[in-house]
Amino acid sequence: MKRKEFLEVSGLALAGALAPGRIARSALAEAGAAGGCRIEAKVYEVKLRHAWTLSRGTWNTRRNLIVRIEKDGVFGLGESAPIARYNESAESGLAFIEKAKPFLQKDLWTFHDLWYEMDGLAPGEHAAKAALDLAILDWIGKKLGVPVYRMLGLNPNKELVTTMTIAIDEVPVMQKKISEAADFLVYKIKVGTADDRKIIEGCRAATDKPFRVDANEGWKDREQALDMIRWMAGLNVELMEQPMPADRLDDIAWLKERSPIPIFADESLMMTADLPRIAAAFHGVNVKLMKCGGIQEAVRIAGMARALGLKLMLGCMVETSIGISAAAAVGPLFDYLDLDGNVLITNDPFKGVRTEKGRIFLNDRPGLGVEGAF
Ligand code: MG
């Protein structure tokens, strides 16, 4: 790309605008043009390969949103996987996106400032906010002709090993799910039931590979939780995610002091602003684009969590390849990945990052690197 073209598409003309000259001014005007953005948001029902049971409930389908923005002949894609625990639904997300439409007519190149403005439009609705953040960054990356991970300065050659999640079920079904995903290198086992020992023993009998265990706030008694953690530590369990309810930080800190394996926050953490409050209770945090409002906030959480000495996991909801490719773009920032949402569904309309033998491979397409019409 010639320098003039690069300036025109990149918005880096801003730097040039400091010096007098017609080219820099016209490039800035083009790059910063407001208005003319078309926004579409649709409900997309993702179908799960297996019933999805957590300590909170069971689902066979999930209602996500696919968002498409188009401006200057370039389109950007985003996805929202609403989280019921935070009072989000497809409908509440659609209502938020409707409210945000005028804000998308602003200068998309100021995506950093737009994120905060968007966040201020309404409390909550982080999954819908994530969809807009993803769509804007996909658009920016396509305008620049570079992948989002390049825009963020991340190394695409870092190995990205992901867990495969084994949701709660009858033990033989959980064993079957493990054997169906035999080429994954590590599994996330969901617990939080009265039969957790049977679940762990049964899964352990199916493979020697490491487990990460997630109780989704399912344990209410800290002494019992510690007994379980100590027992599991001898069964090649690498870490424990959200053993107790999100607000029981004193009990979780008590567990942290005694646990032989790291304790990670999931439900206890949404945004950067939560970190100072929860940091002392955990060894690490599970960041999700849908919890925090997208890629930009995930990067901020990662920076602050590192500064606080916390380990970093990147997780996901049940998502298509849009959401998973967006998460994978920030994957190199994280110590542990749990990005299997697109592998868990049977009707992914998109193609993005490739998951092979438990590893995720980024592609070199611009933006989020996602193909497929919707
Ligand atoms: Mg979790």
Image (cartoon, helix red, strand yellow):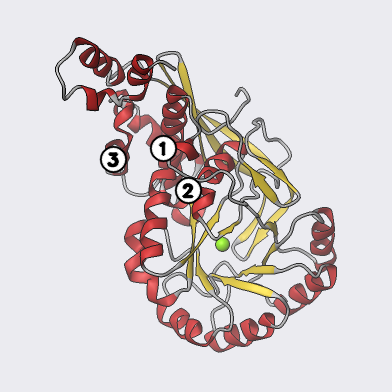
Ligand 1 visible in quadrant: bottom right
Residue at image position (43%, 25%) is 144
Residue at image position (32%, 59%) is 273
Question: Which label was assigned to residue 121?
Answer: 3
Instruction: Residue type at mark 2: give it.
Output: Leu
User: Disc 1 versus disc 2: distance between alpha carbons?
Assistant: 10 Å
What residue did someone put label 2 on?
Answer: 289
Instruction: Where is residue 342? Give x, y as percent.
Output: 66, 43
Q: Is mark 2 within 8 Å of ligand 1?
A: no
Instruction: Where is residue 163? Give x, y as percent.
Output: 67, 57
Please rate how many residues cluster around mark 1, counting C-alpha atoms within 10 Å: few if below 14, some from 14 to 19, many from 20.
Answer: many
Side (left or right) of 358 relative to 138: right
Which of the two marks, 1 or 3, is nearer to us in this view? 1
User: Disc 1 versus disc 3: distance between alpha carbons?
Assistant: 14 Å
Is label 1 in a helix, a strand or a loop?
Answer: helix
Between 219 and 207, the one nearer to me in the picture: 207
318 lies above or below 93: below
Is label 2 in a helix, a strand or a loop?
Answer: helix
Residue at image position (57%, 31%) is 369
Which of the two marks, 2 or 3, is nearer to us in this view? 2
**Residue 185 occupies quadrant:** bottom right
Q: Earlier in the sequence, mark 2 or mark 3?
A: 3
Is label 3 in a helix, a strand or a loop?
Answer: loop
Question: Which label was assigned to residue 133?
Answer: 1
Q: Visible in this render: residue 187? A: yes
Instruction: Residue type at mark 3: give it.
Output: Leu
Residue at image position (28%, 43%) is 116
